[in-house]
Amino acid sequence: MLEKVSNQTQTADFQVKQVEQIPRVKEIVKEKEQPLQQDILTKDKTEKVIESMNDFLKESNTHLKFQFHDQLQEYYVAIVDDATNEVIKEIPPKKFLDMYAAMTEYLGLLVDKKA
């Protein structure tokens, strides 16, 4: 039932490979911080894109409206009906942005009070 264990140890042949140099975290962060020339949109290019989107949406009697959220300091898009000026859809929804702003404000108060 029980087998006798020998005192001889078996060794496997392992080859140790040299570790390649890993870039430092600071170098990676610096690379990501530098904006790409392709990603930079000028005001003129942005207006042209908006105009082309509005031309596309003309047949559905809607247009795009970019609105600025004061607390978050960011823009969001509203799709507006031309006939009634009613907001059909917001991307992202303003309610979510308001909730996010309220949560960040609340968390800021907690951190400031505890610190």
Image (tube, rainbow, N blue to C red):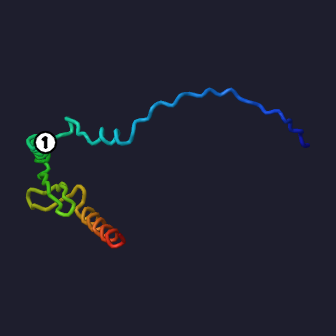
**Residue 92 image-quadrant placement:** bottom left
Query: Residue 90, how many percent across, how many down?
Result: 21, 58
Which part of the image, by quadrant, shows the N terminus?
top right
Residue 84 drawn above or below residue 10: below
Looking at the image, residue 71 lies above or below residue 21: below
* Percent position of residue 68, x then y: 15, 58
* Picture residue at 33% right of the left edge, 67% below the top: 107
List x then y, in percent, for residue 71.
Answer: 20, 64
Query: Count of labels shown?
Result: 1
Q: Is residue 61 left or right of residue 5?
A: left
Image quadrant in which you'd find residue 99? bottom left
Q: Secondary structure at mark 1?
A: helix
Please name whichever residue, 51 or 25, is drawn nearer the observer in this view of the structure.
25
Farthest-out residue, bottom = 113
Residue at x 12% of width, y 57% of height: 81
The image quarter containing residue 6 is: top right
- The residue tagged 1 is 49
Q: Residue at x 53, y 28 (%)?
A: 18
Amino acid at circle 1: Val
Image quadrant occupied by the C terminus = bottom left
Q: Nearer the viewer, residue 42 or 31?
A: 31
Residue in the picture at 51% in, 31% down: 19
User: Around disc 1, counting alpha carbons within 10 Å, would you say few (fewer than 14), some (14 to 19), or many (20 or more)?
Assistant: few
- The location of residue 97, given as percent across then percent down, is 25, 62
